[in-house]
Image (cartoon, rainbow, N blue to C red):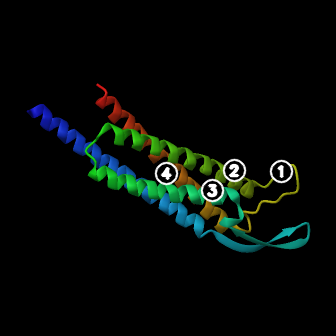
Amino acid sequence: METEAAAEHVKRGGAAVHVALRLACAATSAASLALLLSSEQSASLSFYGFHVPLHAKWSFSDSFQYLAAAMAAAAAHSLVAAAAAVRRRGPQRATWLGFAADQAVAYAVLSASAAAAGVTNINRTGIRHVAFPNFCRPLWRFCGSVAASVALAFLTWLLLATSALLHVIALSRVSR
């Protein structure tokens, strides 16, 4: 009887960790999305004596649009999964579904983060082999906001990967 009570205590503790992990994931993805959607700035760039007006907005880049979609999906997935984790008592089918959903969303978040990081790096460094300037010097607020959004997106991916790992541990306990 004590063993069953201890097992129930471990299940409840695991569910609490899972819910906390889901809520943290929802928070980081929502913060990343908010930073990205508010990223916009205008400035001018002096380029070989010419002043070129610049306007940067997150929606001008396909990579940033992909990141916004992935972050919205991650936030929605995390909130739905947190609600399901509160109600669920651990059937194996639900655990498999949670694992698969975590994997799908995590891969989307990781690929979107990598694509956005590449664009952010090119904006920051320019292209050295051609006369493509560093846009982040005049558009420093835009670049900083986007870089913070990408960093939070990578943190979201880490939280999703951790959640998937917890699903694997739960599935290994069920199969024993």
Q: Amino acid at mark 3?
A: Tyr
Q: Which numbered marker is on residue 156?
A: 4
* Residue position marked by numbered label 1 in the rendering: 128
Q: Quadrant of the C terminus?
A: top left
Seen at 81% across and 52% down, the residue is 127
Give me the disc on residue 66.
Answer: 3
Would you say 13 lies left or right of 79 here? left
Taking the spot 50% from the left edge, 50% from the top edge, the residue there is 155
Q: List the residue tagged with mark 2.
A: 118
Compared to 48, does 77 lie above or below?
A: above
Secondary structure under tag 4 reads: helix
Q: Position of residue 168 (x, y in %)?
A: 39, 34
Q: Secondary structure at mark 1?
A: loop
Q: Quadrant of residue 126?
A: bottom right
Give the foreground label among 4 and 1: 4
The residues bearing labels 2 and 1 have C-alpha atoms spaced at a distance of: 15 Å
Query: Which residue is found at the position 49% from the left and 54% from the top?
Result: 74
Q: Are marks 2 and 1 in contact (CB under 8 Å)?
A: no
**What is the distance, in whole Å, between disc 2 and disc 4 at their CAs?**
18 Å
Please, what is the three-letter code of the amino acid marked with disc 1? Answer: Arg
Q: Residue furthest right?
A: 49
- The location of residue 91, given as percent across then percent down, is 29, 40
How many numbered dots are placed on residues in this image? Answer: 4
